[in-house]
Each structure stands twice: as structure tokens, then as C-alpha cells.
Image: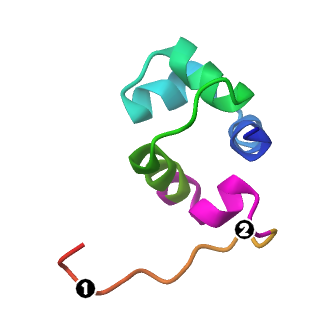
Amino acid sequence: MYPRIRNLREDKDLTQGELAKLLNVSQTTYSRYESGALDIPSRSLIKLAEYYSTSVDYLLGITNSDKAYPKNSNKDN
């Protein structure tokens, strides 16, 4: 279900364990994210999008553009 997060991880030669640590989850949980067995929480999607300098829409397959959206300058977010 989330092939893009797997592809981005592999393109950067990262392990599932390294990404799991970034998201503060177990490697098993992260593996389940990649396989689609477990939905990724929105905060984790945002963290991955920031880490890879892309958008959540790209990670979810909504768009094929891997460019990040401009940062919101509103400090209330």
C-alpha cells in the first residue's frame, strides 16, 4: 500500500530499523507500514515527508510530483 516509502528508503540505502528509530516505533511496526498491514499515523507521514523533502500527497500516491510544498509561515501550526 505504501510502496513509495519503501522505495525512498531503499534509494537512500536506509534500513527499516533506521526509519523506525526516526518515527519512534519498532522495526516490525515500520515494516507493517511499508507492507500496508498497518496504516501510518498522520504525524509519522508528516515526519517522513519532511525527512525526504517531499509531500504527504506524494507518499500516499495522490500526486506523482515528489516536490515538497512550500513551508507554511504561520507559526500556529
**Mark sitting on residue 3:** none
Q: Is residue 2 visible?
A: yes
Mark 2 is surrounded, within 10 Å at the Cα level, by few (under 14), some (14 to 19) or many (20 or more) other residues, namely some
For disc 1, the neighbor class at 10 Å (few under 14, some 14 to 19, many from 20) is few
Report the residue at 49% width, 83% height from top. Answer: 70
Position of 50 with respect to 39 (left or right) is left
Residue at position x 70%, y 30% from top? 36
Q: Identity of the amino acid at label 2?
A: Asp
**Residue 57 shown in magenta:** yes
Q: Dot 2 corresponds to which residue?
A: 66
Q: Residue pushed farthest left?
A: 76
* Residue located beneath label 1 in the image: 74
Residue 54 appears anywhere in the view: no
Picture layout, residue 64 above or below residue 11: below
Where 61 falls versus 25 (above or below)?
A: below
- Looking at the rendered image, the quarter that the N terminus falls into is top right
| Quadrant of the image containing the C terminus | bottom left
Label 2: state its secondary structure. Answer: loop
22 inside magenta stretch: no
Q: Could you tell me residue 20's position as x and y percent?
A: 48, 26
Q: Residue at x 18, y 77 (%)?
A: 76
Front residue of 68/34: it is 34
User: In the structure shown, which secondary structural element does the residue marked by tag 1 occupy?
Assistant: loop
Say which amino acid is labelled 1. Answer: Asn
- Which stretch did the figure color magenta? 50-63
Nearest the camera: 45 or 15? 45
